Amino acid sequence: MRILVVDDEARLLDGVRRGLEAEGFAVDTAANGVDGLWMAQEHSYDAIVLDIMMPGMNGYTVCERLRAEGDWTPILMLTAKDGEWDEVEALDTGADDFLSKPFSYAVLVARLRSLVRRGVRERPVVLEAGDLRLDPATKRVQRGGTEIELTSRELAVLDYLMRNVGDVVSKRQVLENVWDVDFEGDPNIVEVYVRHLRNKVDRPFGRASIETLRGSGYRLSRG
């Protein structure tokens, strides 16, 4: 199994390389994010071990770039000790697993073997409704090829509407799937976000794809 390890700490990088090679892995290394991204683009690996804080390009950016290019090689991200938000962002940017520093080589090897056994996961299907496209992997939205900037909540509402394109969804369904079933705030928050979406994905393009069906809910048209 061929593994790419990307980390700017020379002693750690050399130690991980020697440790993995002793376990039978073939190991390539890179000491910064730019070189790591290039190597991942140029060569095929069974898994990638990726540090977060590196010069030139951090691990989050490397991971995002690979996922945006359709590369779904399993990635294990190395996070800071007690770095709860590092772990959250690692998973949000497309990493498959994470390991906090300092770590045990035995655990690293076990995590890598587990990732390789799972294999390369499939890229999420791009959602489409006419010329409106949402890529769940990269969180990019386009209308007719034009990029549209959405907040995370706007993106989540649009994602739910697009996964139910052509169907009527109630305000309660949107709340339960985008917020949560125990949401106790003003349910009219859904109307606010639907209005935001119309102002971003419909009106600038002369469209009216997000319909309101009074008393029933909302429907995203297919065209």
Image: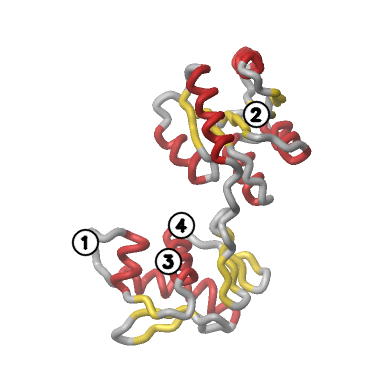
- Residue 138 can be seen, yes or no: no
User: Which of these two is toward me, 146 or 40?
Assistant: 40
How packed is label 1: few (under 14 Cα within 10 Å), some, or many (20 or more)? few
Q: Is residue 38 placed above or below 210 in the rendered structure?
A: above
Q: Which of marks 3 and 1 is nearer the N terminus?
A: 3
Residue on which disc 1 sits? 184
Q: Residue 157 carries which label?
A: 3
Q: Earlier in the sequence, mark 4 or mark 2?
A: 2
Q: What residue type is labelled 4?
A: Ser
- Taking depth in this image into account, of 124 and 14 the one nearest to the observer is 124
The residue mark sitting in front, 2 or 1, is 1
Q: Is 5 located above or below residue 18 in the figure?
A: below
Q: How crowded is mark 2: few (under 14 residues within 10 Å), some or many (20 or more)?
A: few
Display colour scheme: secondary structure
* Residue 85: x %, y % from top left: 42, 37
Q: Residue at x 68, y 69 (%)?
A: 145
Front of the two marks 3 and 4? 3
Residue 152: mark? 4
On residue 55, which mark appears? 2
The picture places residue 112, in percent across and down from the top left corner, at 55, 29
Q: Nearer the viewer, mark 2 or mark 3?
A: 3
- Alpha-carbon distance for marks 3 and 4? 9 Å
Mark 2 or mark 3: name the one nearer the start of the chain.
Answer: 2
Q: Which residue is drawn at 52% across and 32% down?
A: 114
Q: Earlier in the sequence, mark 4 or mark 1?
A: 4
Mark 3 secondary-structure assignment: helix
In the rendered image, residue 193, in percent from the top left (x then y), is placed at 40, 69
Mark closest to the chain's N terminus, 2 or 1: 2
Q: How far apart are marks 4 and 1 (CA)?
A: 20 Å
Secondary structure state at the residue bearing disc 4: helix
